[in-house]
Image (cartoon, grey):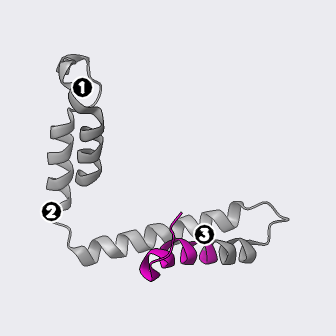
Amino acid sequence: MGNFFEVLSRQEGLAATYIPQMLVDHPVTTDRIAEARSRAAPISAAQGERTLSATRSCVSVVRVLTAPGDTDIEKVYAQEAREDSERYGHPLRGGPSR
């Protein structure tokens, strides 16, 4: 999240610096970056990967359970796997990426 907030900060540029803190409904970006990093610091990379993996699993379960009844979910996932393979495989092979 810290990295994500840094990207947002670069996108905003100086525009956000002219807004008084009392008028902002979220902490200023530098505070958000620091807070995100301090919260993440005690989490090991392995814990983060397990959490990410569990989150992806939950998302998949919800997608399957909420898919319309006429959806062939296996075909949906197979198509996505092919698209991901093509999208990420081309740069590795030196081909075009989308």
Q: Report the magenta residues as a range.
A: 81-98
- Could you say which disc has been placed on residue 41 in the image? 2
Q: How many labels does the image show?
A: 3
For residue 41, what is the image quadrant? bottom left
**First-in-chain label (2 vs 1):** 1
2 and 3 marks in contact (CB < 8 Å)? no
At mark 2, the secondary structure is: loop
Give, as a three-letter code, the residue at label 1.
Answer: Ala
Distance from disc 2 to disc 3, alpha carbons, whole Å, reads: 29 Å
Q: Where is residue 38 in the image (x, y as percent from the top left)?
A: 14, 54
Mark number, residue 61: 3
The three-letter amino acid code for the residue at tag 3 is Val
- Left/right placement of residue 4 relative to residue 61 reads left
**Image quarter (top left, top right, bottom left or bottom right) of the C terminus:** bottom right
C-alpha distance separating marks 1 and 3: 39 Å
Q: Do the residues labelled 1 and 3 touch (CB within 8 Å)?
A: no
Counting residues from the start of the chain, the first of labels 2 and 3 encountered is: 2
Residue 79 appears at what percent x and percent y? 68, 74
The residue under the point 23% across, 74% down is 45
Residue type pointed to by label 2: Ala
In the picture of the structure, the residue carrying the numbered disc 1 is 16
- Residue 35 versus residue 96 in the image, above or below: above
